[in-house]
Image (cartoon, helix red, strand yellow):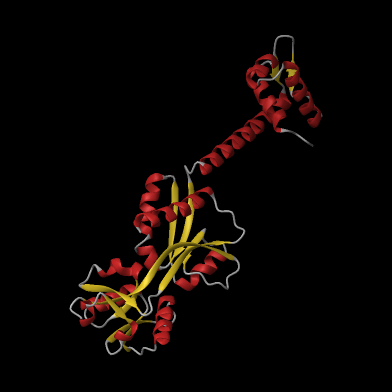
């Protein structure tokens, strides 16, 4: 059986109009074209669907049985087309992002608030997760995209630069190092140091930088989260190295933030998507919005 959409639409229109002439006008077809479409449909079924007289065209029993299903087909198709247009127009949709707790707490909330004000029909789901879980989530399709530093070994992923931050010193405002405009890595030696654990990606980077600079710090405490590091520095328990993107957290305390030099370390955060995956219009628009937003606040 090879029933076409044109045949279904002609059948429903004739049934509603009660005549081939009226149906032809609604469909912008000739009367003969409508008659051909109905005849073809009846041939597919092997039975008549209308009783025809010189004055009236009416559904017979077979036509009345088929009419609700045919009408629903057209309605479902119309709704599907309308829904697709809404997606393209960003009137509705759903986007899921994975980001580190730092990005999820500082960068993304105001960005999402502004985006959803522009597109209230789009739902944004934010997953704050450990850095090492972000790339697998993107690869496995659990999220539309992620925000993280990019490991070159992940061939399944595509990285688009989003934001570049630097490693900075955080210390109590009365600390001797706070009197300097910038601080070398070697100057960190000898002061109580708040470290991040080895399973933290920022902690790994800081350890690598200390080793390359030949600096041994006096590790006073080792914690898992940047927010804890900031709180401990604010309490005067030591100094720490943070990504500059974490600087807003220091404003809650009497903490000085200073540039770290010799060397200055830059860290690139990227938008990660799965290679070969076509993002939904909503996800694509949020990705573009985040790029624009970051340039604005920079």
Give residue 179's position: percent from left, percent from top.
20, 77
The percent position of residue 8, horizontal first and vertical second, equals 69, 29
Residue drawn at point x = 23 percent, y = 73 percent: 255
What residue do we see at 48% from left, 73% from top?
Answer: 132
* Rendered image quadrant of residue 256: bottom left
Q: Which residue is more in the foreground, 192 or 109?
A: 192
Determine the residue positioned at 60% across, 57% down: 277
Q: Quadrant of residue 11?
A: top right
Q: Looking at the rendering, which quadrant does residue 140 occupy? A: bottom right
When the figure is inspected, residue 57 is found, relative to residue 274, above or below; the finding is above
Please determine whether, in this image, residue 150 is positioned above or below residue 177: above
Residue 164 place in picture, x, y as percent: 41, 66
**Number of numbered tags placed on the structure image:** 0
Residue 113 higher or lower than 229, as above or below: above
Residue 230 location in percent, x, y?
Answer: 28, 74
In the image, 50 versus 295, the foreground residue is 295
Which quarter of the image is occupied by the C terminus? bottom left
Of 182 and 272, the residue lying toward us = 182
Work out which quarter of the rendered image holds the N terminus and state it. Answer: top right
Is 74 in front, or is 70? 74
Residue extending furthest toward the left: 174
- In the image: residue 223, left or right of residue 18: left
- Residue 10 left/right relative to 175: right
């Amino acid at each position: 059986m090879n029933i076409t959409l044109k045949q279904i639409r002609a059948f429903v229109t004739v049934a509603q109009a009660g005549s081939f002439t009226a149906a032809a006008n609604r469909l912008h077809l000739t009367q003969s074209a409508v008659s051909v479409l109905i005849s073809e449909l009846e041939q597919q079924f092997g039975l008549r669907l209308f009783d025809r007289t010189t004055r009236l065209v009416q559904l017979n029993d077979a036509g009345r049985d088929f009419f609700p299903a045919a009408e629903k087909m057209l309605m479902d198709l119309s709704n599907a087309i309308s829904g697709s247009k809404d997606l393209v127009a960003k009137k509705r949709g759903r986007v899921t992002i994975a980001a580190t707790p730092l990005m999820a707490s500082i960068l993304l909330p105001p960005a999402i608030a502004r985006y959803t004000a522009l597109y209230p029909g789009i739902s944004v789901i934010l997953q704050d997760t450990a850095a090492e879980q972000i790339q697998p989530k993107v690869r496995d399709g659990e999220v539309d995209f992620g925000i993280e530093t990019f490991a070159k070994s992940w061939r399944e992923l595509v990285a688009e630069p989003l934001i570049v931050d630097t490693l900075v010193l955080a210390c109590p405002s009365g600390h001797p190092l706070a009197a300097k405009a910038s601080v070398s890595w070697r100057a960190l030696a000898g002061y109580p140091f708040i470290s991040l654990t080895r399973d933290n990606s920022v902690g790994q980077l800081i350890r690598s930088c200390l080793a390359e600079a030949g600096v041994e710090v006096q590790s006073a405490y080792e914690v898992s989260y940047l927010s804890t590091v900031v709180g401990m520095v604010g309490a005067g328990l030591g100094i720490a190295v943070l990504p500059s993107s974490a600087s807003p957290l220091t404003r809650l305390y009497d903490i000085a933030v200073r540039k770290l030099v010799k060397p200055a370390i830059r860290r690139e955060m990227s938008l990660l998507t799965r290679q070969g995956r076509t993002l939904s219009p909503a996800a694509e628009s949020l990705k573009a919005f985040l790029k624009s937003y970051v340039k604005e606040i920079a």
